[in-house]
Amino acid sequence: MKGVSVIIDNKSKGNNIRVYRAMKNISQKELAEAVGLTQQTISRAENSSAMSLTTAKKIADYFGVGIDDIFLPKNTINTCIRS
């Protein structure tokens, strides 16, 4: 998967990673250490319009969700949590 990036709506992607981090009450640095990435990579994943599939998979695996869940609109996550 090296060099493959996913371009996704910035607001949806960033908000979901932040939401998942907030649910686990962890910082960017703690997430980075847990998945073997740098804090800067996590910050870029939350704030840019692209991330590698490898990065997305590591983050999704850590939270126990699918890659697509990282990119769902924020209100979809809230609806799923309430169910």
Image (tube, rainbow, N blue to C red):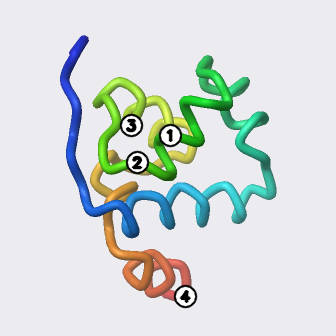
* Residues at circles 2 and 1 in contact by the CB criterion of under 8 Å: yes
Q: Amino acid at mark 1?
A: Arg
Distance from disc 2 to disc 1, alpha carbons, whole Å, reads: 5 Å
Who comes first in sequence, dot 4 or dot 2?
A: 2
Categorize mark 1 by other alpha carbons within 10 Å: few (<14), some (14-19), many (20+): some
Q: CA distance from mark 3 to mark 2?
A: 13 Å
Q: Which residue is mark 1?
A: 44
Work out whether mark 3 precedes mark 1 in sequence or the reverse, and give the earlier one: 1
Quadrant in the rendering for residue 1: top left
Residue 35 appears left or right of 69: right
Query: Mark 3 sits on what residue?
Result: 56
**Precedes in sequence: disc 3 or disc 2:** 2
The residue positioned 31% from the left and 29% from the top of the image is 52
Q: Are marks 3 and 2 in contact (CB under 8 Å)?
A: no
Secondary element under disc 4, as helix, strand or loop, is: helix
**Mark 2 belongs to which amino acid?**
Ser
Q: CA distance from mark 3 to mark 4?
A: 24 Å
